[in-house]
Image (spheres, coloured by chain):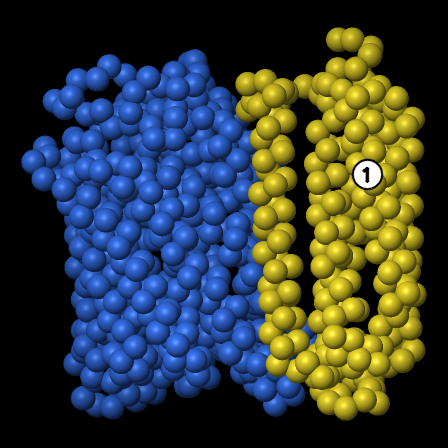
Amino acid sequence: MSDTNYLNVDYGIRSWLLTVDHKRIALLYLGSITVMFFLGGVFALMIRLELLTPAADVVQADTYNKLFTMHGIIMVFFFLIPSIPATLGNFLVPMMIGARDLAFPRLNLASWYIFLVGALFTLWAVFTGGVDTGWTFYTPYSTVGANTKVIPAAVGIFINGFSSILTGLNFIVTIHRMRAPGLTWFRLPLFIWATYATSVIFILGTPVIAITLALVGVERAFHIGIFDPAIGGDPILFQHLFWFYSHPAVYIMILPSMGVVSELITCFARKSPFGYSFIAISSLAIAFLGFLVWGHHMFVSGQSAYASLIFSFLSFAVAIPSAVKVFNWTATLYRGSIAFQAPMLYALGFIGLFTIGGLTGLFLASLGLDVHVHDTYFVVAHFHYIMVGGALMGYLGGIHFWWPKITGRMYPETLSKIAALVVFLGFNLTFFPQFILGYLGMPRRYHVYPDEFQVLNVMSTAGASVLGLGYLLPMGYLLWSLRYGARAPANPWQATGLEWQTPSPPPTENFVVTPIVTGPAYCYAGEEAEVV
Amino acid sequence: MSDHVGTLPAATAHQFDDAVQQRDASGLGMWVFLVTEILFFGGLFTIYTVYRSLYPEAFGHASGTLDITLGAVNTAVLIGSSLTMALAVHTAQVSRNRRLVALFLCATIVLGGVFLGIKGVEYAQKFHEHHVPGPSFHYSGADAQHAELFFCLYFLMTGLHALHMVIGVGLLSVLAVMALRGRFGPSYYTPVELTGLYWHFVDIVWIFLFPLLYLVERHS
C-alpha cells in the first residue's frame, strides 16, 4: 500500500520518543499505563490470594499493608486517572473536533515524560521496600508512623500531577480554540463534553493534592507539626485537602468513561442520543458538584455534624446529573436498532455496574448508614463498581471501538464478545460478595478475618481470577490483531463523528481536507434525514 | 524568506490555521495555567488561614518578628517591576524599538533580582535568629510549637513565591535576548505578553502574602 499514515510514516525509535503527534503520544501512554495496570493487577491478585483463607498464610500484616497501598497508588494515579484522557482523549480530541493536533503538541509530549518520571519515582518506592500508608496517605501515620518509602511515592504522585494538569490544559485550549468550521459547542460529540469536564477537574483539583503531598513530605522530613496533632498540627485538615482533590478524582475516572459510553450507545443503537444537551451539561454539573462533596469521606473523622449534613445533601445532589445520564442512555436504547458488538457489551455492562455503584454511593452518603459500613468491604465494593465496573469497562469498550481507527486493524469479534462477558461475570463475582461482606461487618485493610466470612471471600477470589483472565484476553488478541487482524475500513461501524471520516489509521495531519460541520452530532440513518 | 525576521510573526505552528488562532490559543493556555497556579497557592493559603484562626496568638507573635520595612520595600519593588513589565509588553505591541523592549525587560529582571536579594537578606536574618523550622529552631515567645508552624508556612509560601520569581527572571532573560535580536514587534509579541501575565500573577500573589504574613493582627 502506498498511502502513508501516522504509524508507517516513520519507524525509528526517535520518531516515537520525540514525536509531537497526539496519536503517537496516545499510544505511548497506552503502552505505559498498560504496564502499570498489570503491575497493579498483580498486587490485586496477591491481595485476593491472601484473603482466600481466614488466616495469614501468604503474607503477613506488614506486607499486606504494602500490597493494598501499592495496588491503590498504581491503579488510581498511574492507571485510572490517565487512562481514558491520556490515551483515547489524546487520540480523539483533535480528531473529533476536526483539528490537526492538540493546541500544544510539545507540551503534550512533555506530559508523557513527566508521567514517566513520576511513575519511575513511584516504582522506585514500590521495588525498594514499598509503602504501607494506604493510597490515602492519612496523617499522622504517613508523616511520623510509617517506616516505608512514603516520600518517593509522594514525589512520584506530585510529579505525575503536572502531567495531568498539562493534559487538561491542552484539552481545554484545544476544545475552545481549534474546533472545525461549523462545529459549535452543541454539535460536539458527547465524549468531548465529558473530556472537557474532566479537564476542568484536572486543572482545579490536581494542584491541591500536589501541595498537600508536598506538605506531607515536609512534615515527614523536618518534623514540623503541620498535620501531626502530637506536634501541633491538624490531621483532619489533611483529610479535607486530600479529599478536595481525591473525590473529584473519582469523576476524573468516571466522566471520560461516560463520554465513551455515550458514543457507543448512540452508535450501536443507531440513534441520536435522547436529550443530547442534558447529557452534555450533566458532565459539567458532575464536575462542578463533584468539588463540593469531599466531606462525605469524613463522616466519622470528627468533622462537625453540620458539615456532615451539608456534605450528605450535596452528595445526594450528585446523583441527579449521574442519573440524568443513565436515564438518557436507557431512553436512547429504547426502540433503537441495537447491535451487540463487543464495545456495546462493555457499554451495557457499564450502565448496569455504574448504576449499582452509584446507588450504593447513596447508601454511603447517608449519615446513619455510613457509620455502619464505613471502612468496610461495602465501601471497597462500592468504589470498585465505579472505578472498575464503570471506568474500566468504559475504557475497554472505547479501546475496542476505536481500535480499528487507532491501528487500522479489526479485533476478533467473537473472542472480544467472550472477553467482555468474562470481564462482566468475573467482576460481579469478585465484588458483589464484598457488598455483603461489608454489610456483615468485615473491615477493609485486614489480612485476616473470622471464619464465617470465608465463603464470600472464596467467591471473591475466584471472581478475581476470572476477571484477571478477562483482562489478559484482550491483551492477547489485541496484540494478535496488530499483525493478523482484518484491515479496517475508514468507518467500520458506520458511526457518525469526524474521526470516522478519515482513513484508518489516519494520516499524521488527521484530515486530508479540514472538515466543515453543518449539522448536529449523531445523525444516524433512519432518523430525521438531515444532510451532514 | 525575508531578511527582516524581526518584522515578521514567527511561523504559525502546523496545528493552527493562522497566527490569530495561535495567539488566542497561547493566551488561553496561559490563563488556564494561572488558574491552576491559583489553586496551587490556594492550598497553602487555606492551610495558613485555618491555622491562623486556630492559633491567633502564636501566629500574631511570630508574625511580629518579621521585618515590615524590608517587606514593604519589597512590595514596592515588585509593583515597580510589574510597571516595567507592562511597559515592555506595551512597547512590543506598539513599536519596533527592540532596544526599548529589551531595556524594560532588563529593568524587570533587575527589580526581580532586588526582590530576591532582599528576600535572601530576610531569610538570612531568620537563620541567625534560629527561626527556621527544624532541629535548630529556637523561639523565646509563648507557644513555640505553633510559632514554628507559622515560620514553616512563612518559608513555604514565600519560598514557593520566590521559586516562581526565579522562573520568571529566567523567562525574562530569554525574552530580553530575543528582544535584542528583534524577534518582537507589533505583529508578534505573544511571549512577552504571556510572560507579562505570569509576572503580574506572581506579583499579585505577593500582594496577598505581604499583608497576611507581615501585617494582619501583628503582635510584637
Q: Which chain is blue?
A: A
> Would you identify the image quadrant in which residue A211 lies?
bottom right
Who's the residue at 40% across and 42% down the image?
A: A195
Tell me the chain of label 1: B
> Would you identify the image quadrant in which residue A305 lies?
bottom left
Inspect this view and state whether residue A79 appears.
Answer: no
Left of A262 or right of it: where is B183?
A: right
Q: How many marks?
A: 1
Q: Position of residue A70 (x, y in %)?
A: 46, 69
Quadrant holding the C terminus of chain A: top left
Within-10-Å neighbours for mark 1: few <14, some 14–19, many 20+: many
Who's the residue at 33% across and 20% down the image?
A: A501
Inspect this view and state whether residue A1 appears.
Answer: yes
User: Foreground: A337 or A69?
Assistant: A337
Q: Residue furthest top?
A: B1
The local secondary structure at tag 1 comes to helix
* A297 w.r.t. A58: above or below: above
> Would you identify the image quadrant in which residue A261 lies?
top left
Left of A196 or right of it: where is A14?
A: right
Quadrant holding the N terminus of chain A: top left
Q: Position of residue B52 (x, y in %)?
A: 66, 76
User: Foreground: A413 or A197?
Assistant: A197
Q: Position of residue A110 (x, y in %)?
A: 60, 43
Q: Position of residue A26 (x, y in %)?
A: 46, 39
Colour chain B appears in:
yellow
Q: Which residue is mark 1?
A: B85
Left of A170 or right of it: where is A270?
A: left
Who's the residue at 42% across and 61% down the image?
A: A292
Amino acid at dot 1: Met
* A513 w.r.t. A478: above or below: above
